[in-house]
Each structure stands twice: as structure tokens, then as C-alpha cells.
Image (cartoon, coloured by chain):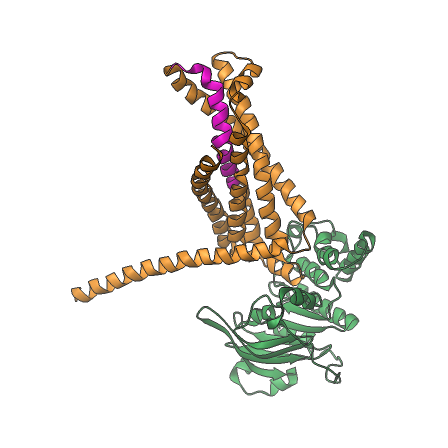
Amino acid sequence: MPYSETHVDETKAFSDIGNWLVKFFEWFGNLALFCGRLIRSAVTPPYEIREFVHQFDELGSKSLPLVALAGAATGVVVTLSTRDSLIRFGAKSFLPAVVIFSIITESGPIITALVVSGRAAAGIGAELGAMKVTEQVDAMEVSAVNAYKFLVATRVLACMLMLPLLTLVADFFGILMGWVANTAAQPISLQLFLHAGFKNVTFNDFLPPTLKTIVFGLLIGVVSCFQGMNARGGTQGVERAATNSVVLASLFIILADVMLVRLILVFFS
Amino acid sequence: MPSKDADADPKKGTPPVQVKSLSKSFGKQVVLKGISLEVGQGETLSVLGRSGTGKSVLLKLIIGLHKPDSGSIRVNGEDVTKLTLKELNEVRKKVGFLFQQAALYDSLTIEENVSFPLRRHSNLSDEESRKRVRELLASVGMEEDAHKLPGELSGGMQKRVGLARALALEPEILLFDEPTAGLDPITAAEIDDLILRLQKERHMTSVVVTHDIHSARAVSDRVALMRDGQLLIEGTFEDLKKSHDPFVMQFLDGS
């Protein structure tokens, strides 16, 4: 009966979309519950200061070389690409300003966030995921230690506070390598480069974009911890947690950046 | 048969573990259907059953890792289903839990694993705490490996360390989740001996969840056999032997 067959297919298609929507909202609901639990455990004493310091150190030392390298590469790329256009428009003297401005307002923060999301989000997602599926998280709870406080709050906070610092590193290497790339094409002293570059830069150009990485850090921490703590199903679950942490953290960072750039323009320009 | 004074223990007050008409489902899957059981002071109860009959879930409900759909669970007289996390943690400090795969923190050394609960919940100085950890590791025969990571140990050794960690806060109640699963018969017997010895030394109340009938026979005063989320029969091994239920007979034949 062809009629009934198509009928069945349509119902199935609708129920598929329905299921997908339910899952979608369920996911956000769970994320909201997770955040609630996280905030509750983060603000109530006792504070896991030792573990926080450990996580802060771990995150910083592991991400630092990558962030420095990514920042340096960004500096070179920005310089090379802008240099060409500026020469074409006869505005070559603006090069240092354009490079520095571009790095501190946008490239530095976003590159840092994306590199850290690749490095740290995967690490946190996999680590917590493995702890979850091997019952280490349960073991912690059973030892009367709040796993949300010990494992999640410390990591989220470490991400939030470490990102602005790493951004400074990326900015530093970006600007330095921007100068090197520029000098390779046409020698200019570092002093002159910096002087020309920072002449019109105000604190309002520098501070809000650097501090917005706190939000990126929050996203990286929350998303990867959420994925890790909800991992189930052995090694596959760990793999899913790690992959989803990176994918979702990067996606949310880019989406949040759209809003943050707009907000910063409204409030600080 | 271990001869322990469980039967002759009409100690006053409530039994340390009391479970009443406990039900739990995960989604559409019903795991426990109205389980009731009691474990007396100093007694060891083994909960037997095939894999996947909700035995581990029962233990996790007792320690408050899951919330039941209905029913009550009293540990030392406190209904763990109704406690706040803070109150629950006070109860948890009195309970040791040995996980199926030991669940040692794999970024910490053996020593740090055992000292983890101590560092948090006791006022011992560093020196005292180290001494205590050494004693605990010695009591499970693992003092040689204090500086290794869990990944460098075999399954049986990990279980020993897990046991030492569970004992760190000197619990009154011990919960064992498949203490002998995945171990060869000799190692399993060693773990059983260890459990027996610790019980004798410390007079703890224990619940052992297992599908290993040898192990249950070795360590327990009383057994409860579970099937399809319900208690099929409960009593001493002798009581079970008298049963004519085909499932009980089949299960005992495995011994």
C-alpha cells in the first residue's frame, strides 16, 4: 500500500525532527543545571585553592608554547597581508599601527582562545571523561569530596584567569614577529615600529578585548567540564567527550566573539 | 564457613544499613523493583545475582550516588535520600566503598590515592598522615609500591590499594562492588582473605555485591539473591541450600 507507506515515512520524519529538538533543548537544560551546580559549589567554602593553583599551573605551562607560536605566526601573517594592501593604497606608514591594532583588538584574543580550546578543552574533556567512566568521579564523591568543587570549579576558574594572561603572551609574540616580518621586507627599528604602532592606541582599545577572553575561558572550561562529567560508555564516551569539547568550545567562542566585539564597540568606542 | 558473631548480635538500636521498598529505573529500564533488606551491626551481607541485575546500582543508591525513584535508605539511621549534600558527606565519611575497577585516581601515586581522603577529612599532621598511609598500605600488603602510579599495577593490586583507600577514614560500614570480578581465582581468594581479615580486625558492617559465589561463601554471614531487580531469597547459605527454586539451585550449583 503506497499511501500508508508515505504516511508512515512522514510521521517518522516529523518524529525524527521532534526527537532532535527534544535532545537539543535537553542538552541546554542539562548545561544550565550543570552551571547552577558549578556556581553553587564554586562560591561555597571550603575552597580548593591548592588544586586551583595546580590546574592554573598545568593549563598555563601546557598552553604557553602553543599560544606563543600561534601568536608569532599570526603576527607574521597579519603583517604580510596588510603590508601588501597598504602599499597598494599608499598608506605604508600606517603599517605598524594597523598590525598592532589588529593583534591586540582581535587576532591575539581569538587565536589564543582557539588554540587553548584545542589544547585544554580536549585535555579536560578527555581527563574528566576518563575519570567519569572509570568511576573515579564517583570515588571522589564517596570520599565526601565535592567533585564539582574539586574537579570542575578549579578548572573553569583556571581557564578564566589564564586566558587573559595567555592573550598577553600571544600579543607580545605577535607584535614582535610582526616587526620581524616587516623588517625583513623593509628594515625599521623596533623602537620606531612600537612608537608608530602604539601612538594612537588607548587603554580602551587594549583592555576590553583582552578581558573578553575571560568569557572565552569560561566557555572552554564549562563546555569541556560538562562534556567530561557527562561522558558515559567506556573509551568511546571519552573520545566523544574530548571531540565535542573542542568542537563546541571553538564554536561557542566564535559565536560569543561576534557578540562581544559588538558590545565592546558600543561601550568603549 | 566464617564463624562470626553475627547471629548473636541483637545489638540495640537501628541496623547500620536499612533499605525499604527501593525502586530505581534509568529511563525505561527498571533496575530495582521494591528491594528491602537490612544489614546488622558487624554483619556481612552478600548480594548475589547475575551481572546486570542492578546489584551495583543498589550499592550506589546506599551511598547516595544515585537517587531512588521511591523507597528509603537508612545508613546509621539517616535517610540518605533526604539529606543535603553536606549532611550526606558526613554519612559518607563513615562509609568505605571499594569500586569494581578500584577507581584509583590515575594521576596520583598509590600513596597520594590513599592519603586523598585523609588530607581532606582528618586533622592529622603531614607526618602522622604519612604514617597512617604506610600502615594502611602495609595492611593490604602494598607498602612496597607506594610511589607507583595505578597504571603500573595489576588489577588485584589496584583492588588492594582501593581497599586501603576505602579504609582510610576508619569507616564503620564497607561497601564492596564486585571485589573479585576480573581476578584470577588465586588473587580473588587473596582478596577474600583480606576482606575477612579486615572484618575480623575492625568489626565492620559490610555489604558485598558479587556474582562470585565462592567469594560470597567465603566472606559473608548472610546472602541475598537478586533476580530481575527483586530479592528472590535471603538467608544463610544453609537456608539457600534448602530452597527448591530452580534459579537458586542453579546459582548454587555454580559453586
Supply the letter of whichever chain is orange: A
Horizontal and vertical percent position of residue B216:
65, 74
**The one of A133 and B64 positioned closer to us in this rendering:** B64
Horizontal and vertical percent position of residue A107:
48, 31
Which region shows up in magenta? Answer: A90-118
> Residue A52 magenta-drawn?
no
Q: Name the residue: 65% across, 63% down.
A: A142
Q: Name the residue: 28% across, 59% down.
A: A13
Quarter of the rendering occupied by the N terminus of chain A: bottom left
**The one of A75 and B126 positioned closer to us in this rendering:** A75
Left or right: where A145 falls relative to A120: right
Q: Is residue B188 visible?
A: no
Majority secondary structure of magenta residues: helix
Which picture quadrant has residue A5? bottom left
Left or right: where A5 falls relative to A252: left
Horizontal and vertical percent position of residue B243:
58, 87
Question: Chain B appears what colour?
Answer: green
Q: Name the residue: 63% across, 61% down.
A: A141
Which picture quadrant has residue B212? bottom right
